[in-house]
Amino acid sequence: MPVFRKPESIINTAGYCGGCGHGVIQRLIAESIEELGLQDHVIGCVDIACSFWSQDALNFEFIAGPHGRCAAVATGIKKVRPDATVYVHAGDGCSYVIGLSETIYAAIRDVPITMVVVNNGIFGMTGGQLNLATTLIGDKTLSSKAGRDPKTMGHPVDMLKTIANCDVAFAARGALYDVKHIDETKRYIKKGFQNQVENRGFSIIEVLSPCPTNWKLSPVDAMAKIKNETEKVFPVGVYVDRGGKD
Amino acid sequence: MAKAKANTDLCKGCRLCVANCPRKAITALETVNKKGYEIIEVNEELCIGCGICYKVCPDYVFTVE
């Protein structure tokens, strides 16, 4: 029978709210790194937001740059430490709103880093404000009390399609609402790290994750919302896979 | 046979394991742990050691061995 045990790189408890997807994503990152045998020389870049907690939980080197600038910081690290495994663990507010240009320029430069973007459709740590790129139409947030109205607040954007226009090595979207999709997300994240080992280029993996606290739903209902609503707007799957071409 | 063991000190009472367990072997309790979250209990007779609770748990409560 298979044995399932917490990866050795996780040395502390997860600091997130109950039912948050960040804890699962942190485990998928740690498992992928351990399975590829890279755990001795990993530098993680976290954002000043919920993903900041993974500094305490994981036994890797970490740096947190200014809010939203993770991709730029990771680019710098990879330039001066090309032998290190560099990854970004950031939210959608960081990667798609505040740090959009950093994310796009990391993709244009095709820096061989692995970027994991947690798409929970909201600014989680600041209390649940509207995220212009990922909040769904009609969602009530702290800064859209009557629900998101496309007339004044526009429509959500599938950023992976934008990034797919740049010549990146790998772009994929996973979800966390059931075990099948969690396993699929792990395959994407592992593929992202594998690309980095083979120096193939920029890999971005977006993960549809719940934020039960700010969505004001139970964790189980939040997962059902991803399955029934979010996935319709942001379809899961591989967007770009450049394969062996360099 | 492998069985799931729960370290309920880490539990945050999200109930994702209860909803995802294919054998309904995990029950939600009203007992609270040190942090004040309502915990869960694994019925080892029903557990088949599939590891689904380990995979869905955001707080690394479960070990299957």
Image: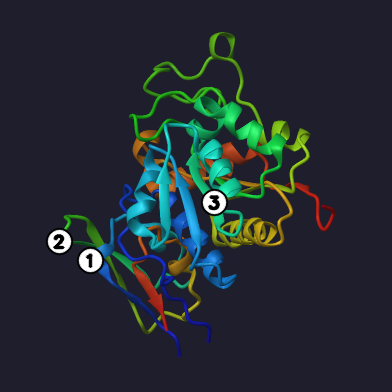
Q: Can you identify the residue that label 3 sits on?
A: A87
Numbered mark located on residue B34 in the image? 2
The quadrant the N terminus of chain B occupies is: bottom left
Residue A160: percent from left, percent from top: 68, 37
**Labels 2 and 1 in the same subunit:** yes
The CA span between labels 2 and 3 is: 34 Å
Q: Can you identify the residue that label 1 sits on?
A: B9
Callout 3: helix, strand or loop? strand
- Circle 3 marks a residue in which chain? A
Which residue is more in the foreground, A117 or B34?
Answer: A117
The answer to whether residue B23 is left or right of residue A207 is left
Crowd band around label 1 with a 10 angstrom C-alpha radius: few (<14), some (14–19), many (20+):
some
User: Visible in this render: residue B53?
Assistant: yes
Q: Are marks 2 and 1 in contact (CB under 8 Å)?
A: yes
**Labels 3 and 1 in the same subunit:** no
Three-letter amino acid code at disc 3?
A: Tyr
